Image (tube, grey):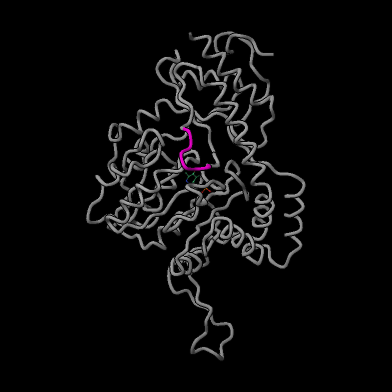
């Protein structure tokens, strides 16, 4: 199979089945770990959750890890633990998944968008500086595709204005920056373990921090904000009361068992992702109009996405590129429709198109090609063939 002409223009498909842009990788070992967990005393939050948390805390070199039901709930709790509340402003990037901004919205604060550095495709420290007001309390940068953001520049802004930083590292688990694991940065770093992410627990998320008080607040809020100390109620052994508005964002021993088994494979996953990236980089280097992801500087990222930019010189625009790939059964995706285009952020906060020129220019060109540890060599070849065919057709 594989004609010289893309199927969109009359050729035959590069492949018969759809290749997704992301996928979990689960072996018998993970399945056995999950079944064993079901035989344990706890199938909700128990000792295996603690073991998973301790292992991640060790890996990213922090004192505390608090696992939650999803990356989204991790973001909610991180904002609550930071003390964000009504009247506060929290600066973040529009080029992200909506949950990043919900650090603010779930806590009744206002998400304030700032433009990106188009090279890294994450928050530009100078653009953040422009958005700071007396009400600004925090910054939520996101490591786009797994490429570390300008960590140094953003921490400088945070220091200048005494802001709390919550790093959305949903894309970046397993990577490092200047020899420091992604996760070790202050004040909090959070991860997602959704199936397309670098490791998975089905659904799941985590906040890591060195701050003892923040960790205590995260743990309390994760589980109903319940007080179990029965001070003054010693003769009432059942005594437990909620002290504030907490949540049930408890991670389970079943998920933790899967997570521990996935952590054993983290290096294997990284190696496979790196191999695929190397092949893509080499295959696309000489194609006009394609910008491959930036070379890592002072970092060893674990990439979640391989996001190229299809620009002038390629011969067709991004929409046609995506449609051509889909017709060839290459399941590309676009990350992300900028948040200031979403009805929710427009209606609630008055955002409109045209406000963030760098984000918009990058968004118009973005396409994520398939990247995951389950990809066979033939899958990589299919993606490369489809892209090269499309380029050749338009030259
Ligand atoms: C950048 C980013 N932030 C937050 C989330 C939310 O994570 P979850 O799906 O685990 O709730 C995701 C993933 O979906 C994401 O990619």
Residue at (28% x, 31% y) in the render: 354
* Residue 292, image x, y percentages: 48, 27
Magenta residues, dominant SS class:
loop
Front residue of 140 and 221? 140
Tell me the quarter of the picture where residue 291 sits: top left
388 over 103 or under it: above or below: above
Coordinates of residue 102 in the picture (x, y in percent): 40, 50
State how many labels appear. 0
Q: Residue at x 52, y 47 (%)?
A: 176
Is residue 109 located in the magenta-colored stretch of the structure?
Answer: no
Is 297 drawn above or below residue 232 in the view shown?
Answer: above
Of residues 216 and 303, the one drawn nearer to the viewer in this rendering: 303
In percent of width and height, residue 273 lies at 61, 36
Percent of width and height locating residue 172? 52, 45
| Residue at the spot 27% in from the left edge and 56% down from the top edge | 161
Asked whether, in this view, residue 68 is left or right of residue 351, the answer is right
- For the N terminus, the image quarter is top right
The residue sitting at the bottom extreme is 235
Residue range highlighted in magenta: 295-300
**Nearer to the camera, 380 or 206:** 380
Query: In the image, is residue 345 above or below residue 277?
Result: below
**Horizontal arrangement in the rendering, residue 15 relative to residue 140 (left or right):** right
């Amino acid at each position: 199979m594989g004609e010289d002409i893309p199927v969109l223009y009359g050729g035959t498909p590069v492949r018969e089945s759809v290749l997704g842009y992301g996928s979990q990788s689960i072996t018998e070992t993970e399945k056995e770990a999950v079944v064993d967990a079901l035989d344990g005393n706890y199938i909700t939050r128990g000792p295996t959750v603690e073991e998973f948390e301790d292992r991640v805390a060790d890996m990213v070199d922090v004192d505390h890890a608090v696992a939650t039901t999803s990356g989204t709930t991790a973001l909610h709790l991180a904002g609550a633990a930071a003390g964000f509340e009504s009247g506060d402003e929290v600066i973040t990037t529009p080029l992200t998944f909506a949950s990043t901004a919900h650090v603010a919205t779930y806590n009744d604060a206002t998400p304030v968008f700032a433009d990106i550095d188009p090279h890294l495709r994450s928050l530009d420290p100078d653009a953040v500086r422009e958005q700071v007001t007396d009400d600004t309390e925090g910054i939520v940068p996101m490591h786009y595709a797994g490429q570390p953001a300008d960590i140094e520049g953003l921490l400088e802004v945070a220091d200048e204005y005494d802001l709390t930083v919550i790093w959305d590292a949903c894309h970046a688990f397993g990577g490092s920056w200047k020899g420091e694991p992604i996760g070790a940065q202050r004040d909090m770093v959070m991860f997602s373990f959704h199936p397309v992410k670098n490791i998975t627990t089905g659904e799941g998320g985590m906040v890591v921090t060195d701050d003892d008080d923040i960790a205590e607040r995260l743990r309390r809020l994760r589980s109903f904000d319940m007080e179990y100390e029965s001070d003054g109620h010693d003769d009432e052994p059942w005594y437990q009361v909620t002290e504030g508005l907490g949540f049930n964002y408890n991670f389970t021993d079943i998920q933790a068992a899967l997570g521990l088994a996935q952590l054993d494979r983290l290096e294997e996953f990284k190696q496979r992702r790196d191999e695929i990236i190397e092949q893509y980089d080499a295959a696309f280097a000489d194609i006009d109009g394609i910008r491959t992801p930036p070379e890592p500087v002072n970092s060893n990222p674990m990439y979640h996405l391989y996001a190229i930019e299809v620009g002038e010189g390629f011969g067709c625009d991004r929409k046609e590129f995506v449609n051509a790939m889909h017709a060839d059964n290459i399941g590309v995706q676009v990350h992300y429709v900028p948040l200031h285009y979403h009805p929710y952020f427009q209606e609630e906060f008055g955002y409109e198109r045209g406000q963030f020129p760098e984000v918009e220019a990058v968004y118009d060109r973005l396409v994520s090609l398939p990247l995951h540890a389950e990809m066979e060599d033939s899958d990589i070849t299919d993606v490369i063939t489809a892209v090269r065919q499309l380029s050749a057709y338009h030259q």
